Image (spheres, rainbow, N blue to C red):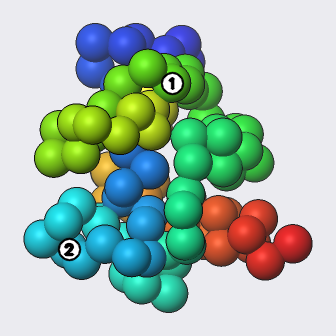
Amino acid sequence: MALDEDTAWVLWPEYFDIKRSRDQGRKVNKNLAISEPTVEVISKALEKLGIEHKVETEKSYPSNWHGHNGRVLAEKTMKKSELLAKIGQEISKIHLS
């Protein structure tokens, strides 16, 4: 399946930042979050999961508009909550190694 940018899931590094609260944009449990997540780490996790994606480095999370941390567009292969949990598991492994 090809990546359709118009319907792809938008993934922000802030979703996986252990320093953020849920109100500040973290979307995964703290045990799946890491310190200072990047679009590169999310990209590596998606590659390991075999999910087509595109990194956009010039984008800013709406509530963190001054920080240009980028975002990742990911192919819709499952529910977003499932995808976030799987990415969280992978980035936790990547972060530990």
Tag 1 secondary structure? loop
Tag 2 secondary structure? loop
The C terminus - image quarter: bottom right
Numbered badge on residue 66: none
**Left or right of 83 in this view: 47:** right
User: Can residue 75 be seen?
Assistant: no
Cα–Cα gap, marks 2 and 1: 23 Å
- What residue did someone put label 2 on? 22
Looking at the picture, does residue 4 appear above or below residue 80? above
Numbered badge on residue 57: 1
Using the rendered view, name the quadrant where residue 12 is placed: top left
**Left or right of 72 in this view: 81:** left
The N terminus - image quarter: top right
Mark 2 closeness class: few <14, some 14–19, many ≥20 residues within 10 Å: some
Using the rendered view, name the quadrant where residue 26 is placed: bottom left
User: Can residue 6 be seen?
Assistant: yes
Residue 20, percent from left and from top: 31, 72
Looking at the picture, does residue 35 appear above or below residue 69? below
Residue occupying image coordinates x 32% and y 50%: 80
Please state which of the two labelled residues, at mark 2 or mark 1, is closer to the viewer.
1
Residue occupying image coordinates x 12% and y 71%: 23
Residue 54, percent from left and from top: 55, 21
Mark 1 closeness class: few <14, some 14–19, many ≥20 residues within 10 Å: some
Single out the residue that lies furthest toward the bottom: 31
Residue occupying image coordinates x 57% and y 48%: 38
Looking at the picture, does residue 97 appear above or below residue 76? below
**Left or right of 97 in this view: 3:** left
Using the rendered view, name the quadrant where residue 40 is placed: top right
Residue 92, percent from left and from top: 65, 73
Amino acid at circle 2 = Arg
